[in-house]
């Protein structure tokens, strides 16, 4: 059996139709089709909702904590409007792979979102187009802390200041900030763990929130400014949204991501090529 060569770092990735509509979720605005064509919406078997990002035509990057129960999920992509979502339009899922070291509440009491990363494999390659296309993965070695002040987009159907479940995908631009900003927030007496595998981002008034988990935090590729790269995954934050949130540092997991996609990245319906 010859393995299918996997196009990690897709030839065309991270392209957005967003132009100058950037203003500067919580404090966000509704996205149009094609602005964030990698954004997908997940619903797990136990009814948890969140986001994810297409990283190839067959794989979605998301957060592990969405799968605390079952691995079964429903995925919708290529949409901004949740109204009229039908199960028939879902992208069929084959399996979900959680990071092997992800242990919620490692010591049995305090929240632990360390290694909050998962990959969802689609049962067949998705049909890509202007409204559905992958975001770029970080380059190998992009493991150092993200520079404070760098701006990126967060996206999701999570809670906003006016609705618990907005109908339209929301987006906002937020800066990377130092981890001390996230550490200093009120977690209602809980003491979550903070590590270098996490990124803190946000600003007063603009943040991700409940329901955005698993969704991407994308930064412009400095070398290819027309491309966006997924550098974070919405992971956790204080119950009270609206300041800073913690994101999984995707660059730290590139090796696991590539390995998982390689090991499990063939599709039954396709011919194996030499
Ligand atoms: N864990 C949340 C979710 O399940 C994400 C919360 C992010 N919170 C924040 N203040 N940024 O959707």
Image (cartoon, rainbow, N blue to C red):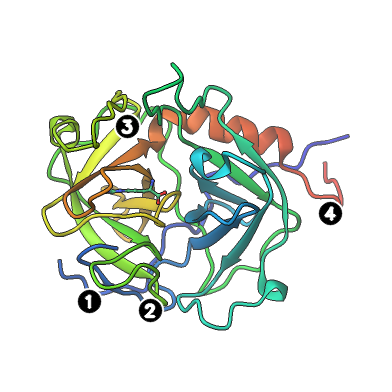
Asked whether the beta carbons under mark 2 and mark 1 sit within 8 Å of each other, the answer is yes
Residue at the spot of label 1: 21
Residue at the spot of label 4: 270
Q: CA distance from mark 2 to mark 1?
A: 10 Å
Classed neighbour count for the residue bearing mark 2: other residues with Cα under 10 Å, few (<14), some (14–19), many (≥20): some
Give the number of the mark in front: 3 or 4: 3
Q: CA distance from mark 2 to mark 3?
A: 29 Å
> Which mark, residue 32?
2
Asked whether the beta carbons under mark 1 and mark 4 sit within 8 Å of each other, the answer is no
Asked whether the beta carbons under mark 2 and mark 4 sit within 8 Å of each other, the answer is no
Classed neighbour count for the residue bearing mark 1: other residues with Cα under 10 Å, few (<14), some (14–19), many (≥20): few
Give the number of the mark in front: 2 or 4: 2
- Look at the numbered disc 3 and give the secondary structure of its residue: strand
In the picture, measured across the screen, residue 270 lies left or right of residue 253, that is right
Indicate which disc, 1 or 3, sits on the residue closer to the N terminus.
1
- Look at the numbered disc 4 and give the secondary structure of its residue: loop
Residue at the spot of label 3: 198
Indicate which disc, 2 or 1, sits on the residue closer to the N terminus.
1
Task: Give the percent coordinates (x, y) of residue 181.
Answer: 13, 36
> Which mark, residue 249?
none
Q: CA distance from mark 1 to mark 3?
A: 29 Å
Give the number of the mark in front: 1 or 3: 3
Residue drawn 67% across the image and 44% down it:
71
């Amino acid at each position: 059996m010859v393995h299918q060569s996997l196009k990690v770092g897709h030839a065309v990735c991270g392209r957005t139709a967003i132009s100058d509509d950037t203003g500067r979720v919580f404090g966000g605005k509704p996205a149009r089709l094609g602005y964030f064509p990698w954004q997908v919406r997940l619903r797990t078997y136990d009814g948890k909702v969140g986001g994810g990002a297409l990283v190839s035509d067959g794989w979605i990057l998301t957060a592990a904590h969405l799968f605390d129960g079952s691995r079964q999920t429903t995925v919708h992509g290529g949409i901004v409007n949740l109204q009229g979502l039908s199960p028939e339009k879902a992208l069929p899922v084959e399996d979900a792979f959680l990071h092997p070291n992800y242990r919620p509440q490692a010591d049995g009491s305090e929240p632990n979102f360390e290694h909050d990363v998962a990959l969802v494999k689609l049962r067949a390659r998705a049909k890509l187009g202007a409204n559905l296309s992958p975001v770029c993965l970080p380059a190998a070695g992009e493991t150092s802390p993200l520079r404070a002040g760098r701006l990126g987009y967060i996206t999701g159907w999570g809670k906003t200041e006016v609705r618990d479940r907005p109908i339209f995908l929301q987006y906002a631009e937020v800066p990377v900030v130092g981890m001390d900003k996230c550490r200093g927030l009120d977690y209602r007496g809980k003491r979550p763990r903070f590590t270098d595998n996490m990124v803190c981002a946000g600003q007063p008034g603009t943040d991700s929130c409940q329901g955005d988990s698993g969704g991407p935090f994308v930064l412009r590729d400095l070398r290819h400014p027309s491309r966006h790269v997924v550098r974070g995954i919405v992971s956790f934050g204080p119950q009270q949204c609206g300041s800073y949130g913690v994101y999984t540092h995707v660059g730290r997991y590139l090796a696991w991501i590539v390995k998982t996609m390689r090991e499990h990245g063939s599709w039954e319906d396709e011919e194996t090529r030499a």
